[in-house]
Structures are given as C-alpha cells and as structure tokens.
Image (tube, rainbow, N blue to C red):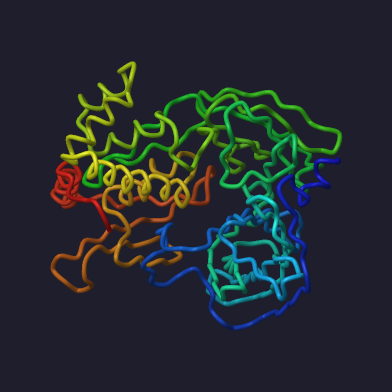
Amino acid sequence: MMRRNNIRILAVVLIATGALIFQACSNRSLAPTGSYQYLYDYESRDLHPEYILYHDGADSSTVYFRVFSGELLYTRLALNTPFTTQLKLKASVSDEDGITRDTLSISLHERVKDRQGWLIGSMRIPMREGKWNLLMEFTDRSRNLTQPSFIQADKSTTTTAQHYLVTKYETGEPVFGGFVTPGQKVEIISDRNREALVSPSLWRFTSELKLPPPPFSTATPDQPSLDGAQAVPFVKESDGAWTFEATGALYFFTHDASRRSGLCIKASGTHYPRVKDVDALEWPLRFITTKTEHEEIIKNAYPKLIIDRFWLECGGSKEHARELIRVFYRRVEEANYYFSTYTEGWRTDRGMIHLLFGNPNQIIRTSQGEVWNYGEDQSASLLSFNFRKVESSWTNNLYVLEREPGYKPYWERMVQTWRSGKIYSE
C-alpha cells in the first residue's frame, strides 16, 4: 500500500497544487477537431507535457501529468527570494458532438531544484460513463506559453485500457507512454476492477509484427492477435494490485473473458522513445533501403559501420550525412512520441508517412480520423494521406492509412530523394 500512496510523491520532484476552479455545462465546442500545421512537430514546441488518463471512479477520473523542468522558466521577485515557476493546468471535457460539459483548472507553483528532472503530478476531473474528448492545456505563466494536448477518453466499459494504471514497482511512478524497459517489474492498478468477479489474465504476444506495407500496397498492416499467445503468471499484491516482470515484448492484461478489451503493455528499448542504440538505428532504415542492403545491416557483426557507410553514400560528405541522420532519426523519435500503439510509433502508418515525408502543410483532424496534406491547398500538386481511426482492443491511438496504387510514384520519388541526400532541412 505504501507504493500506491506515494504515487504523486516521486523520487524527482513533487508539484504542489493550488486553487481549483470548476465550470460546468458550457456550450463551447472543444472537440479535438480542426486544421493544424505543426501538430506532430516536436521541435516546434517549447513545452512537451505528457499525460495518462486513468478512470478510477464512476463519476470522475484522474489525469497524471509530467513535464521536464528544463523546459520551464524559473523567475524570482527579488534577489533574496527563491526561483519559482508559475504553472497552470486546464482540462476541458466535451462529448462526441463537441459540446463542452466540464472545465476546470489548477494553479501550480514549484521552486527551482538543484538538478533538472521531471515535474510530476495529478489532477482529478469529473467524467461520467461513456466516450469523451479531453483537451489538456499546460501553461507556463512565466512565459505566457500554452501547449494544448488532446486525449480521447473511453469509459464505455470498465475493461478499457484507461481503467488500468501501470506503475514502476519500486517507486510507484506512473509509466508514461505505455512502454516499459525490458526486465522491469511493473504494477497494474485498477480501482474499478479490484473486486471483479472475473479473474484477470495476462498474455504475452509471441509473433513478430511486420513493418507496415507501403502506401500503394493492397495489403493492410499487421495487428496483434491472441491466437497462440502465452499465458503469463503474475502476483496479486495485498493492496489488490497485480505485478509481473516484463521480460517479453508485448503483453495484454484483461478482465474481459472474451479478451476484447484490456491493457496493452509494450517492452521496448531502454531509451525509448529516443534513438540511442544500434537496434533503434537499424530497422527504420528498411523504408529507404533495398532488402539486400537491409539484410547486410542486420546480419553484420558491426551494423553501425554499415549504417554509417549507407548515410555517407547518400550524403556525399560527412557533414551532409550527419544532417541527413539528424533529420531522419529526429522524425523516428517524433513518431515514437506521438504515434506509439502496440508497437513503436515509427512502425505505424502515420509514423511511416511522417518518417519519409515529414510534417505535412496541413492536418485536418476529425472524429473519424486525420487527413495529412502536403503542398498548397487546392493546387494540382497537393498530396493527401487519409488515416482512418480504428477501434482496437490494444490501443486508443490506431490510425490506418487508406492505401491507393496512385501513391506509388510519390513514394518511390521520396525514397530516391532520401537516397540522393536531398532532404537536409524542413
């Protein structure tokens, strides 16, 4: 029980919450729809808050949030006063028609620490059963800078993924992003399923997911299936939580006897979503290499040498090759940050397009999906990719590209552009 109670008092830092302001039943539309340009451009943003939505009650839910202290501005009123940061977190809940039902905000104050780290806290919001759109707005008041984020809330049954909270066993810290380190011991908490009559089950997915087919293919992306999955033992702790050690790659935890909804847990590299080891360098290259070239990379005893040689041949010089590498793997990291599902973000359809084509000129977001437009609107050269949002037991972030044969020349041209070293800035 000690770990559970300490979930907001983390090893790095504690955010102290201030006054709570509540406003109900507004008619202002705040559904996550509209037109955007830099929705998935990590570098264009100065703030990168992360969120976990956890449904721990029938009429309310909790949002856990974190932001890196190095992204915040600390100021002081006088020379003899401490440096502090002035923050505000606002949450707006709207229904599927875009009508705002609840809005609330909290003021946050934090003194400067001796070293940079994560500021982590939580916010309780009113939310009844059903499906909702949640707009989170994180504001650094010292800079008058606000970063909005959209979360789709699924509270339709008590077995959806957001009814489970994954924490690190040793510290009780929430696991952000849904990815854990291989070999890490994790704890699964579910207040609404603690006394469920149906016992939970934990399954390990054993098959390797293939890379998504190119946009002109008639095939569809692989999705995980529990056919042939292995049952994994776990421990029920005295406080009602469940613990296990993530030694495999992909897990599915559920109270649903038919296994139609539950929690997906992915064990990825130690540095994920960052690209810091050779394994993370190898596989994204498959989109712009031939089969023979890629097999040479993954089978070689020193793959980094082959990767460096590939980029040097593309760039023509060390300086230009370094710039190609910077842009390419920055996009990999952005895809991991924004598009992760039951697999790494760069392996998804949106990640694949983002990796090769970069940030679109316009993103049109609706409740049915997203349209990415490259080029000038209404021009003959406009290239559009339509991503359809798909309901999945494994993730709430699955968007599948509507593939068309007409994409082939655009794809091949972009691959050749990379290989010719012509993409060096955006």
Q: Is residue 237 left or right of residue 298?
A: right
Q: Is residue 186 left or right of residue 3?
A: left
In percent of the image, x 55 and y 25: which residue is there? 248
In percent of the image, x 40 and y 59: which residue is there? 41
Q: Nearer the viewer, residue 64 or 341?
A: 64
Quadrant of the snapshot with the N terminus: top right
Q: Position of residue 191 (x, y in %)?
A: 78, 48
Residue 60, located in which quarter of the rendered image?
A: bottom right
Residue 195, located in which quarter of the rendered image?
A: top right
Residue 197, located in which quarter of the rendered image?
A: top right
Q: Is residue 257 left or right of residue 415?
A: right
Q: Position of residue 36 (x, y in %)?
A: 39, 69
Q: Position of residue 381 (x, y in %)?
A: 15, 65
Q: Nearer the viewer, residue 43 or 97?
A: 43
On screen, residue 6 above or below 183: below
Q: Position of residue 88 (x, y in %)?
A: 66, 71
How many numbered discs, if any? 0
